[in-house]
Amino acid sequence: MDCLSTGDLDTFREVLAAHILTMNKSRLAVQSGLGRRTIYDLLDPQKEFNPSIQTVSSLLRALAS
């Protein structure tokens, strides 16, 4: 949460990706209500990292459960 409050999106992406990589992506998609493609796009370093607050919120809720 510190990286979000300071605007350090690179660190936030790294931490989020580390958590996502340990999870089953299909299950995470169901739990978060997001598409698997969206989840994989967040992990892809070649893609721009600019998720909506709703996407981040859905992922954090799913990761917390």
Image: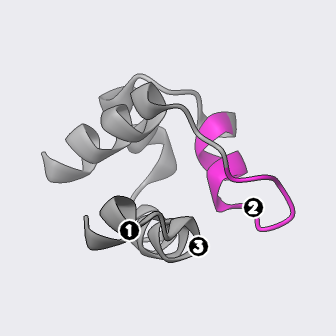
Choose top left, top right, bottom left or bottom right for residue 27.
top left
Name of the residue lying farthest toward the left: 65
Of marks 1 and 2, the one in the foreground: 1
Residue of label 3: 10
Report crowding for label 1: few under 14, some 14 to 19, many 20 or more residues within 10 A (C-alpha): few
Residue 31 lies, with reference to residue 48, above or below; the image says: above
Residue of label 2: 44
Q: Amino acid at mark 2?
A: Asp
Report crowding for label 3: few under 14, some 14 to 19, many 20 or more residues within 10 A (C-alpha): few
Q: Quadrant of the C terminus?
A: top left
Of marks 3 and 1, the one in the foreground: 1
Q: Nearer the viewer, residue 65 or 24?
A: 65
SS at mark 2 in the image: loop
Of marks 3 and 2, the one in the foreground: 3
Q: Amino acid at mark 3?
A: Asp
Residue of label 1: 6
Tell whether position 46 is magenta: yes
- Seen in the image, is 8 located left or right of residue 64? right
| Residue pictured at 25% horizontal, 51% vertical | 63
The part of the chain drawn in magenta is 38-49
Residue 23 lies, with reference to residue 34, above or below; the image says: below
| Residue pictured at 15% horizontal, 51% vertical | 64
- Seen in the image, is 20 located left or right of residue 44? left
Q: Nearer the viewer, residue 33 or 52?
A: 52
